[in-house]
Amino acid sequence: MDDLNVVLEKNFKKRANIGETSENEEDLKMLKKYLEDNFTIKINGKAKPIQFLSKEIDNNVVVSYLRINEVSKISSIEIENKVLLDLNSDQQNIIQTNINGKKKSMMFEGENYSDILKF
């Protein structure tokens, strides 16, 4: 949570309060924009718009819930996740997917910020 607020402040040049009692709509807008710029998904080789659903704080960790609409069949999913990697080279981002009833996880860190799952 602290690192996320630091990177938001660095990118948007204004104080960020994600997870704090002073969090407001402007903080959520910065978070959504940062995710749009640093997190992409391609389904079957085509980039898809990501809908930010919500976020929660779990032991000082920000968990974001995202959804992609209008996907009929998935043969591959490619995720590029650079969230917080520009701030901390030791950052680890975990993605948990539930696709076609199959749960899979991916970990992104350092130079490893992209991965593909095939079904």
Image (cartoon, rainbow, N blue to C red):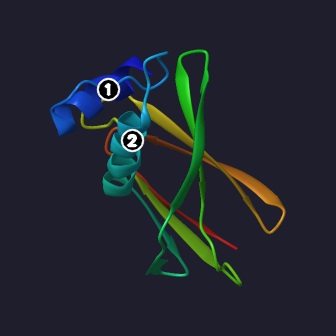
Q: Horizontal and vertical percent for residue 104?
A: 71, 52
* Residue 88 against residue 105 in the figure, above or below: above
The one of 16 and 36 positioned closer to us in this rendering: 16
From the viewer's perspective, tell me whether residue 55 is left or right of residue 102.
left
Task: Name the secondary structure under disc 2.
Answer: helix
Q: Which mark is residue 31?
A: 2
Q: Going 47% across and 70% down the picture, which residue do you hit?
A: 49
Question: Dot 1: within a 10 Å radius of its alpha carbon, few (fewer than 14), some, or many (20 or more) residues?
Answer: many
Q: Is residue 42 above or below residue 103?
A: below
Asked which quadrant contains residue 29, the reply is top left
Residue projecting furthest to the left: 13
Quadrant location, the N terminus: top left
Image coordinates of residue 40 in percent, x first then y, are: 42, 61
Residue of label 1: 16
**Residue at 49%, 15% in the rendered image:** 21
Residue type, numbered disc 2 = Leu
Between 4 and 15, the one lying in front of the other is 15
